[in-house]
Amino acid sequence: MNHNNLRRLRRTPQLREIFEETRLNASEWIYPIFVKEGAAEKESINSMPGQFRHSLESLKSLSDEIAEAGVKSVLLFGLPSSKDEAATSSRAENGIVQQAIRQLKKQNPDLVVMTDVCVCAYTPHGHCGVVKGEAIDNDATLPLLAEMAVSHAQSGADIVAPSSMMDGQVAALRCALNRSGLLDTAIMGYSIKYSGPFYGPFRDAADSSPSFGDRSSYQHSSANPRHSMRELKEDIEEGADLVMVKPGLSYLDVIYRARQATDLPLAVYSVSGEYSMIKAAAERGWIDEKAAALETLRAFKRAGADLVITYFAVQACQWIKSQS
Ligand code: PBG
């Protein structure tokens, strides 16, 4: 006999449980929520089974549902009823996200509320920045993002998350928040966000597809992880409180690299396409939804993420509850 007996530690369910190296916990999941201005009731999203565009009314029952499940934090996305070049509705005091923040905080003061800060859903062209001709004007976009973030913070958001991928967006937000006395509002940098097909279902959900061209002049290329690490460093220097890698499944190596590169909290956004692939295969009976989703959530954690933004958050909380 010249081998070790490693199976010793995998012999029974109890042994397997106590030797688990990676444990899943409800507090690490952030649930993305879409809120739609003027909606009478919630609308299902075709490309994302089980997810909805919520009305302020349906957000009330969702808020109870997520509290009951044990979800601790949410990330809000707005669908405004009017769009213009200046993304005016994104910073309106009574904008849809601003109202949703106040309502959620009133109903559940313990919920950590994060907001997406980007103009793509608020402009007719659907790009993440101000359009000049066919180009995106980086510096003209920064004040719009800053005002939007201040408005979210004034409505009660705990964390604002600039996702437009403009250079200097974290610094612009920090400076504007500080100037408005919003020193306690944290910034989650969408530090590493790749351009690619996995946002498809989200753009259908949020009505935010670019009307011309694509986002590759501002989002990163999947070929260039070193370039992404430079972007990460910039966000840290600009004052991000936590950083993010997005998407998740196709960038586990990048999550691992980001983990080595910083001691800041690290989030990963497991995006719409990752969710919808599992949902679609499960609907056909080709994959076990719960096992597949939990395996991906564990993969993000193994790679080094502290937090995972996932459309499975509510279900995952329920799944791990029923296991213990
Ligand atoms: C806005 C934004 C997008 C996502 C999050 N914030 C869309 C995009 O970049 O086109 C995608 C999220 C997902 O696919 O789940 N800029």
Image (tube, rainbow, N blue to C red):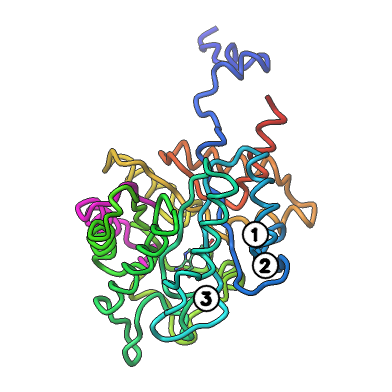
The amino acid marked with disc number 1 is Ser
**Residue displayed at 33% across by 76% down:** 217
Say if the magenta span includes residue 254: no
Say if the magenta span includes residue 231: yes
Q: Nearer the viewer, residue 312 or 130?
A: 130
Q: Residues within 10 Å of mark 3 (few under 14, many from 20)?
A: many
Mark 1 vs ligand 1: CB below 8 Å: no
Estimate the spatial distance between the alpha carbons at disc 1 and disc 3, rounded to whole Å.
17 Å
Disc number placed over residue 13 in the picture, else none: none
Q: Nearer the viewer, residue 29 or 295?
A: 29
Front disc: 1 or 3: 3
* Residue at the limit of the structure toward the left, as seen here: 237
User: Magenta part of the protein: which range?
Assistant: 219-244
* Residue at the limit of the structure toward the right, as seen here: 285
Residue 263, percent from left and from top: 28, 38
Q: What element does badge 3 sit on?
A: loop
Q: Is residue 156 above or below residue 70?
A: below
Q: Is residue 224 above or below residue 262?
A: below
| Picture quadrant of residue 69 | top right
158 displayed left or right of 141: right
Q: Nearer the viewer, residue 197 or 9?
A: 197
The amino acid marked with disc number 3 is Ser
Closer to the chain start, of discs 2 and 1, is: 2
The amino acid marked with disc number 2 is Ser
Asked if the residue under mark 1 is in contact with the one under mark 2, i.e. CB atoms within 8 Å, the reply is yes
Residue 116, percent from left and from top: 45, 61
**Residue displayed at 48% across by 45% down:** 112
Q: Which residue is mark 3?
A: 208
Estimate the spatial distance between the alpha carbons at disc 2 and disc 1, rounded to whole Å.
7 Å
Residue 306, percent from left and from top: 43, 39
Mark 3 vs ligand 1: CB below 8 Å: yes
Q: Which residue is mark 2?
A: 47
